[in-house]
Image (cartoon, rainbow, N blue to C red):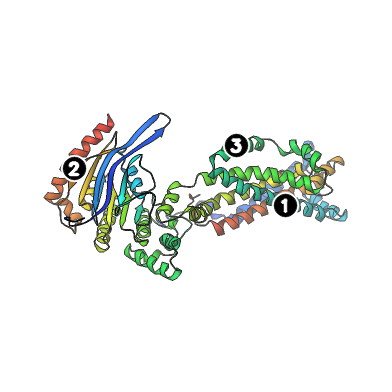
Amino acid sequence: MANETNHTEKSWIEKVPNKGWLAISIIAALIFWTILSYIPATARSFPNVFLVVESIQIMIERGVFFKDIQSSLISVTAGFGLGFTFALPVAILMAWYRPVQYIIEPWIQFVRNIPPLAYVPLVVISAGVGRTPQIIVITIATFLIMSITIYQGVKNIDPTLVKAARVLGAGDKDIFLRVIAPASLPFIITAVRLGTAVALTSLIAAESTGASAGLGMRIRALNNTFESSPMLLYIIIIGIIGLILDKLVRMLEGKLTGWQEKNEG
Amino acid sequence: MAGKERGIKVKIDKVKKVFESRSGQVVALNGVDLEIKENEFVTVVGPSGCGKSTLLNIIAGLTKPTSGQVLCDGQIIKGTGTERGVVFQQYALFPWLTVKGNVEFGLKIKGVEAKKCKEIALKYLKMVELENFVDHYPKELSGGMKQRVAIARAYAVNPSVLLMDEPFGALDAQTRTQLQEELLQTWAEEQKTCFFITHDVDEAIILGQRVVIMSARPGRISEIVDVNIPYPRNQETKMTKEFLEVKNYIWSKVYKEYLEVRK
């Protein structure tokens, strides 16, 4: 395009490829980690890399490693799925009918600020222990963030697009299917991305409901025996799952909403 | 319509529009009367706040007048209709549709079959010289190209009245001049009644057969000036004595309106 810069001297920052920077970043983190593992004040929380990798074997031998990952993924998927299923229609209703917005939105904003951990005991009182309360907690947390995100997006759809559709003969149904739905897609995808992140961050809270397996539940259980290597391992696994989910959503975003105008950089 | 050369296409009859705001009532339009003839090109100039966009929205059927009415082909306008096309200043292209998809939008709603849709879309994209950008998305186009797509999209549903709300206002001077000439050309080829709002007096004169001057507070028509310069008009027309005379006259009137608004 016209505003491309001249190919004069590239600075050294651009000479290193992106993959190179990623490698440098990982090496820096490993060095930092190793330093922490030697400093007496932090050594007990940060066992070195080898001990942590070794603990994969330990957890597999205990027969919990894959069970924990599987259990957490089931809770996250089910909770997120339900959260999304409720969030989408509620968000659209709020954007469409102002009374619905006036009644519901303040409460969504109110509950959103409460950490899930706070209402977990209440959920357990009614839903008992096991899978159900885990899913309920994640459903609530993801519903709150996703309904607000989608609602704000739909509310901010450019009204001239609706006008343009009307003068081209569109009725209410056409407006909804051919304008509101596609125009909302970017916000829906943003909501999905935020929702997956919240699903993971509320996992620990969700699994404090007397779960029998799960990444969050295991971290708490390991806490009782001060086994920091597998704890750190599980924390890193949650982070990796988060990264993978984020990448997946971004791929989806590129496919579905590549038409969006984006600011460079 | 006996006794007249051309029929009345749009009749604006004592239109008044009052907006309720928190600080009270705002009279956007107060008793506007105007008759636009079939295939006539009418341009509207006036200071901001004179209600020219509100008037266009009322003709389009996007806004209801507080009192009075607008008739199109003798029928009272109650809502939008595809016989009245609109081109907006902000282009208002659907960013998720390609250039072709945008032009086909109205046709698909009408239920025109896919093959015919494509044919019509291509015809109008050729008209605006964008036949090589059929599969591009709006984000890949310049402002001038976007507005060309919007014009093709409005033409595609074949309206008999074309309402344009400062369509070239956001474009640079050269692109604007080019689009003005293209618009005159298409108007000559496909006769349509044009109602064109602008804040550019030159643009109003070069395009219009009549220039409607509006004043603000409350919005009303203060004068209608006939532009008796034969078509085809182009850039050179802007140097002619006739053009400059009309321009001087309209400018003196409009300038007065701007000063009024400033007060």
Q: Do the residues marked 3 and 1 share a common chain?
A: yes
Amino acid type at image mark 3: Ile
Residue B90 coordinates in the image, percent (x, y): 38, 49
Q: Nearer the viewer, residue A69 or B190?
A: B190
Q: CA distance from mark 2 to mark 1?
A: 69 Å
Give whichever of discs 3 and 1 has the lower sequence position.
Answer: 1
Reading the image, the residue beneath label 2 is B250
Residue A241 coordinates in the image, percent (x, y): 71, 52
Give left or right: position of B222 versus A147. left
Residue A103's label in the rendered image is 3
Residue A126, by quadrant, is top right
Relative height, residue B28 to residue A56 (above, below): above
State yes or no: discs 3 and 2 in contact (Cβ < 8 Å).
Answer: no
Q: CA distance from mark 3 to mark 2?
A: 53 Å
- Looking at the image, which residue sits at the far bottom? B115
- The residue sitting at 75% across, 53% down in the picture is A74
- The residue sitting at 42% across, 48% down in the picture is A160
- Looking at the image, which residue sits at the far left? B241
State yes or no: discs 2 and 1 in contact (Cβ < 8 Å).
Answer: no
Q: Nearer the viewer, residue B194 or A186?
A: B194
- Chain bearing mark 2: B
- Chain bearing mark 1: A
